[in-house]
Image (cartoon, rainbow, N blue to C red):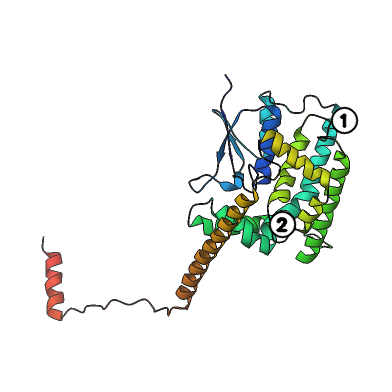
Amino acid sequence: MAAPLELSCWGGGWGLPSVHSESLVVMAYAKFSGAPLKVKVIDNTWRGSRGDVPILTTEDNIVSQPAKILNFLRKQKYNADYELSAKQGADTLAYIALIEEKLLPAVLHTFWVESDNYFSVTRPWFASRIPFPLSLILPGRMSKGALNRILLTRGEPPLYHLREVEAQIYRDAKECLNLLSNRLGTSQFFFGDTPSTLDAYVFGFLAPLYKVRFPKGQLQGHLQRLSNLCRFCDDILHSYFRLSLGGISPAGQETVDANLQKLTQLVNKESNLIEKMDDNLRQSPQLPPRKLPTLKLTPAEEESNSLQRLSP
């Protein structure tokens, strides 16, 4: 009997099994390859490191990062690529590298750096799944981590300023989406009628961008004009995750949006309260440390103490 496989990952919303791209990559690959994953959704009771999510846990191993998790599953005979030719295998690696270089920075920016999206969608969603008071701290750290990751790859000359970097990463991302759309064409999957690793990566990075409702989404708008990529995401959700093409009903989405708005207000109030407390502490008068009075003994008391120390 195979060892149990448990995947710790971020949960879902907007009709998605997970809103986290890297978690979604692993979940999709497991569906394609038949790997019997037990999904453990992170909530506010989670005590592990959220920076390593997704995490695959077995009786003898703990594996993080999508590429390493997929390699581990292949070694366990869960291989979604066994029908691919050598050329198709090479194309898979090339397209995954293209996605990580050209598309990932724009996805990170859309979720974590664009202020309207971050404060109204990303931050409240993730804060609701992190225990207080870390819920007020970790989303900000994740946002800074995303920005640093973008600047690490794109902040070199001649792109010195953030505006220049933003413009470039969105141009690259739109070009990447166009290439993926042309490669998919009218096919159901990228290499015919059977999904593979490349389909898992494309679905993982496109589905959150396609489904999550952002107030600002220039890349989202471009994706929605590429109907074959949208159909690709809908087909996988419907066939492998048993979700309807619309994800959830309009009435259900209104409830989700209303709850998210309330959560946004709550998180912002808590953050403002902590900031005010910090300001009050900084502005309060700082008194110098109080010196304790020194007691002086009379000559008679000093002589008495000296005699007591000398006596056996």
Residue drawn at (56%, 30%), measured in percent from left and top?
A: 58
To which residue does mark 1 refer? 87
Task: Kindly indicate whether the residue at mark 2 contacts the one at mark 1 (C-beta within 8 angstroms).
Answer: no
Quadrant holding the N terminus: top right
Image spot of residue 192 (x, y percent):
84, 31
Q: Is residue 273 left or right of residue 33?
A: left
Residue 194 at least partly seen: yes
- 92 vs 34, nearest the viewer: 34
Q: Nearer the viewer, mark 1 or mark 2?
A: 2
How dense is the environment of label 2, judged by Cα within 10 Å: few (below 14), some, or many (20 and up)? Answer: many
The tag earlier along the polypeptide, 1 or 2, is 1
Query: Which mark, by number, is residue 110?
Result: 2
Instruction: Name the quadrant containing residue 154.
Output: bottom right
- 151 vs 54, nearest the viewer: 54
Instruction: Name the quadrant containing residue 64.
Output: top right
How dense is the environment of label 1, judged by Cα within 10 Å: few (below 14), some, or many (20 and up)? Answer: few
Q: Is residue 291 left or right of residue 129?
A: left
Residue drawn at (69%, 34%), measured in percent from left and top?
A: 240
Q: Secondary structure at mark 1?
A: helix
Q: Is residue 63 left or right of residue 153?
A: left
Residue 68 at least partly seen: no
Amino acid bearing label 2:
Thr
Amino acid bearing label 1:
Lys
- 297 vs 61, nearest the viewer: 61
